[in-house]
Image (spheres, rainbow, N blue to C red):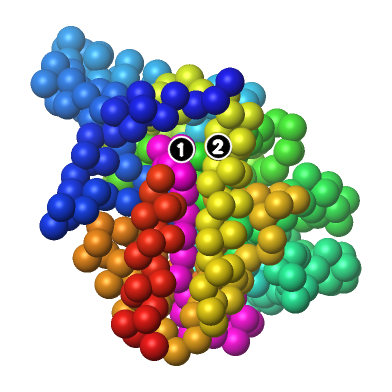
Amino acid sequence: MALAMDRIRQDIPILKETFDGNPLVYLDNAATTQKPRAVLDAMTRFYETDNANAHRGMHVLAERATIALEDSRRTVQTFLHAAHPEEIVFTKSCTESINLVARGLSQAWIDADAIILSILEHHSNIVPWLQVKEERGCDLLWIDIHDDGTLNMQGFEEVLRHGTVKLVAITAQSNVLGIRPPLKEMIQKAHAAGALVLVDAAQAMAHEKIDVTELDCDFLTFSGHKLYGPTGIGVLYGKRKLLETLPPLLGGGMMIGEVFTDRFTTADVPAKFEGGTQPLAEAVGLDAAIDWLTQFSWDDITKHESLLMKKAYDLLQKIPGLTILCPNPNPNPSPLLSFTIDGVHPHDLTEILGRKGICLRAGHHCTQPLHRRLGIPASTRLSVGIYNTTTELDLLAKELPEAVKRLQ
């Protein structure tokens, strides 16, 4: 059944905004998504009726806050099909989630150990491992891409034979090329080689069903704000037995068992990773975002976004001097496209389009190694979400050629 676009768009208050008489055409969903009214109302309601610190105090508001936090944890557990709610750790971002794993795992590593990354990775899944390399002396081994942007699986198998690979950290979907690596195959091969696998699912969570039990990944991370939820909350999924072996990233209140003048013990998972006051309203907002998104079928979302991306691909191909960096979306459409235009800087292009209310992303998208591999300093990115329409792409098709003419 097709998505009811009028109702979906009515759910998103910001889509009513206009700019100098132009409607908002928001095509920067890979950076962050806009929020449905259900998310905004849930967060407001929490502050108006339930606001207190969770897991602290016996009064009624503290109990309500605790219930709200743990209800959100169970919602995320169900969403990911994790085995236990304790396998869901709340952080402030996907970035913090990856850092938590990097800092925790690497304390037991030595300079002979290695980490495998792909050239597709976001800086958030590169810099923490570069820090590990600097601090522990570990090797970073890289998986390259083919000329069509797909991952070089033969190269992956070659670096896996390094012999002391401790971890493979891989994106579920490139935020520049839209490439979806064959995660299940990679996880099976990594495990056969004795390596753990962390999946950075930030770009994928709003667009496809991810089942951590089926994937058998060891860790998975994502951010709420790219899933139609609020900023300020991220998720780390980790297999319980692995989380129990990791040290906490932060020390402070709520992550302790007991504290003495000369030592301390940690709480059980997930509390030992959630030191300090948690982002409670944000957890409530994430809960509401997942409830809102899961009222739609993944098949309907995929069909809708695929239609949009095929139309976007066709309209971009008509622009002289425009090069699309992403593979042709017809066999395996992804929700984003990146491109360059001869003689036109991405920042200038997106600034002009922005004056017309059309929001695209310009820059290296926190993927400088990938852009160097592609031989370009920057690109322009178009990324869709569940609320985008073909009418919005028609507006882009009208304004883009005019913007290019002004700049060339």
Q: Which residue is mark 1?
A: 386
Task: In the rendered structure, find residue 47 and report the number of the disc placed on it.
Answer: none
Q: Is 375 one of the magenta-colored residues?
A: yes
Relative horizontal placement of residue 304, taking residue 192 as reference (left or right): left
The residues colored magenta run: 370-390
Residue at (21% x, 53% y) in the render = 22
Q: For the residue labelled by badge 2, is the local secondary structure a helix, a strand or a loop?
A: helix
Relative horizontal placement of residue 263, taking residue 269 as reference (left or right): left
Asked if residue 225 is positioned above or below residue 324 in the image, the reply reads above
Asked if residue 307 is positioned above or below residue 11 in the image, the reply reads below
Q: Position of residue 110 (x, y in %)?
A: 67, 70
Residue 17 is at least partly visible in this image:
yes
Q: Earlier in the sequence, mark 1 or mark 2?
A: 2
Q: Is 21 one of the magenta-colored residues?
A: no
Q: Position of residue 161 (x, y in %)?
A: 88, 68
Task: In the rendered structure, find residue 304 and report the number of the disc placed on it.
Answer: 2
Where on the picture, by quarter, is residue 151?
bottom right
Residue at (31% x, 58% y) in the render = 358
Between marks 1 and 2, how big is the CA–CA gap?
A: 7 Å
Q: Where, quadrant-wise, is the C terminus in this rendering?
A: bottom left
Asked if residue 366 is positioned above or below residue 94 in the image, the reply reads below
Camera-side mark, 1 or 2: 2
Question: For the view shown, which residue lies furthest in the top direction?
Answer: 60
Q: Position of residue 113 (x, y in %)?
A: 72, 69
Residue 254 is at least partly visible in this image:
no
Residue at (22% x, 65% y) in the render = 355
The kind of residue on which mark 2 rests is: His
Q: Residues within 10 Å of mark 1 (few under 14, many from 20)?
A: many
Where on the picture, by quarter, is residue 90?
top left
